[in-house]
Image (cartoon, rainbow, N blue to C red):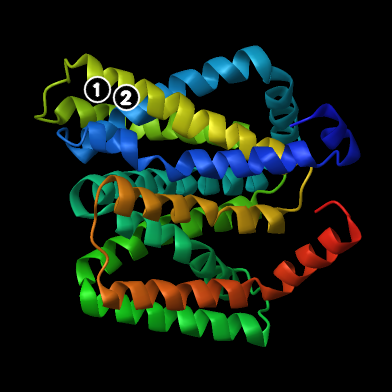
Amino acid sequence: MSGSASANNPRLNFFIAGLSANIIWGFFAIPLRLIAAWPADTILYFRIFFSFIFVWIFLVFFRYSHWSQDWERMKQMTSKERKRILFLLFLSSILIMGNWFTFIYAVNNISIKSAAFAYLICPLITTLAGCLILKERLSRIKWISLGIALISVIMLAQTSLLEVFWAILIASFYAFYMIIQRVLRDIDKFNFLAVQLFICSLIVLPISFMSDTPIPSSFLFWGIIALVAIVFTIIPLFLSMYALNGIASATMGILIYINPIISFAVAVFYFNEIISLGQFLAYLLLLIAIILYNSAFIRQIFSKLAKREPI
């Protein structure tokens, strides 16, 4: 991309960052399948440990000022506010750990399609949860889109109830995690992840010692785990955080769909997973629900592009 293009649209770099993060996540199934011989819980433990180490190294050397600002803000809070934030941090740690485990298990033991389907319905589940928990209001169009998505899930259940179960489980963990993210808006997201990984490490450390599974000795396993921690956890997270500095969260919400679309392509064209006619129709119906759900924002994007305004 030329420098003149970036100069004409200063938000282009932020958009590319958000797009890149979701493209990276779309290929996540490939390294996971390379270590499918190991149990999902073993992969989870070491993904958490490696991510914890790399995140805290990055935080100490490059983002210590952000950490200090949040720490000072915490000290100025009342005891009740601190307890509330600590509780939400603990709960979000459980949720992200559950999301990671179910995703790993689904990719390596169920199907990549189920994991991809989870991230297609995740924004819709997040919206419904926000309506029920945070009392957010939904337009009639969004209620209709949620109804169509429900029909899609029911149709998919007719073809593979197991895949639907794991897709909803993955999506639900992440949806409720995102609800907590909305509540804790004032905390730096990278600091948020650093504390979560600390809590997750404290939880899984004794469990890993009690596990009967021996510590992997394969260089392939350790290489993939390091790749997962850096390339598929820290880098895309940092890119998405950077993107939110220059583009609207609604734009990021649209870019999120790039992730499962690529995952489906990887499942079908790289791993040769079969999609039946019933599954295809269910996915098509869900795509219609997603377009309907985001129709107002899609019209806004085309309007801005026509006027050559930044998105």
**Callout 2 environment at 10 Å: few (<14), some (14 to 19), or many (20+)?**
some
Check disc 2 and report the residue beneath it.
224
Residue 168: % across, % down: 35, 65
In the depicted structure, whether residue 228 falls above or below residue 287: above
Residue 204, by quadrant, is top left
Residue 62 visible to the viewer: yes
Q: Residue at x 11, y 28 (%)?
A: 213
Q: Quadrant of the C terminus?
A: bottom right
Is mark 2 in CB contact (under 8 Å) with mark 1? yes
Check disc 1 and report the residue beneath it.
221
Q: Quadrant of the N terminus?
A: top right
Question: Which residue sits furthest left?
Answer: 212
**Callout 1 environment at 10 Å: few (<14), some (14 to 19), or many (20+)?**
many
Residue 294: % across, % down: 65, 71
Residue 44 visible to the viewer: no
Q: What amino acid does circle 1 point to?
A: Phe
In the depicted structure, whether residue 82 falls above or below residue 64: below
Task: From the viewer's side, name the closer residue of 142 and 288.
Answer: 288
Helix, strand or loop for disc 1: helix
